[in-house]
Image (spheres, rainbow, N blue to C red):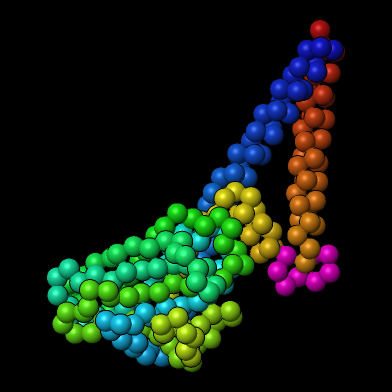
Amino acid sequence: MIKRVAVLGGLLAVWLLVVGFVAKSALDRLSVPPWGNPSGAATALVLADDTRIGQTFTAPLPGLHRVDVLLDAKAIESGQQVVFHLQPDAPNADDLWSTTLSLRENGGRQTLTVEFPPLRNSKGQSYHFSLEAPGGVSGEPIAVVSALEEMLPGSSATLNGQPIPGDLWFQSYYSLRTREKIDVLLSRMADGRPYILGVKGFYVGLGAVYVLVLGALMTSIVLSILREQEGSL
């Protein structure tokens, strides 16, 4: 009897480890696409010596850690720099992140990529990023590409901190932890489905029933094998 319980317990433990490993591997491969405004008719906002061009937006996910902004710098000199600021979208808010970046010398359109430590509680929070050239611009003006006809929910391009029509061409990126990935996966499964199929808890319960049924089936098979072995002794 003791041997039967020990074997059964060991197999169930292995079964749970396998289920956990498979689930973790699937979640590790789960990613979310960037969010922002990657399209629209292009309009240039010139980054002059005394201007700040920016964008407000509401983060749709936790873990905001990167922002890409499309620039148009047709002819710039070596070492031309711009300063990126990220702050909460609130009056007189301090910078959450600020950094100085050098542009490529070959000019033309280029993506300015800014990475920073993940903001774990970014979901639903409003942010404002802005660009400035405090040392002045040498050569042709640097322009930030925008789309006047685009209006993302909770977003707006800004000039010297004041909202202006349209949105910049930008993308925001998010780094999710395991429990956040589970929430995203459940939201995808429930999105747009009717009645109880649109409730995330339904899929949690369905997964638990699946694991329990398979565990019970495995237990039944193991017990049958052990009985046959004991009967043959």
Q: Residue 100's quadrant in the figure?
A: bottom left
Q: Is residue 40 left or right of residue 46?
A: right
Residue 143 location (% of width, % of height)? 30, 83
Q: Which residue is found at the position 17% from the left and 72% from the top?
A: 105
Magenta region includes residue 173: no
Estimate the x, y position of residue 215 in percent, counting from the top left: 77, 36
> Looking at the figure, which quarter contains the C terminus?
top right
Q: Is residue 168 visible?
A: no
Instruction: Tell me which residue sits at (17%, 79%) in the image.
Output: 138
Q: Is residue 195 magenta?
A: yes
For the record, the magenta segment spans 190-197
Q: Furthest-top residue in view? A: 233
Q: Is residue 30 left or right of residue 48?
A: right
Q: Is residue 132 above or below residue 119?
A: below
27 versus 43 height, above or below: above
The residue at 53%/86% (across/down) is 151
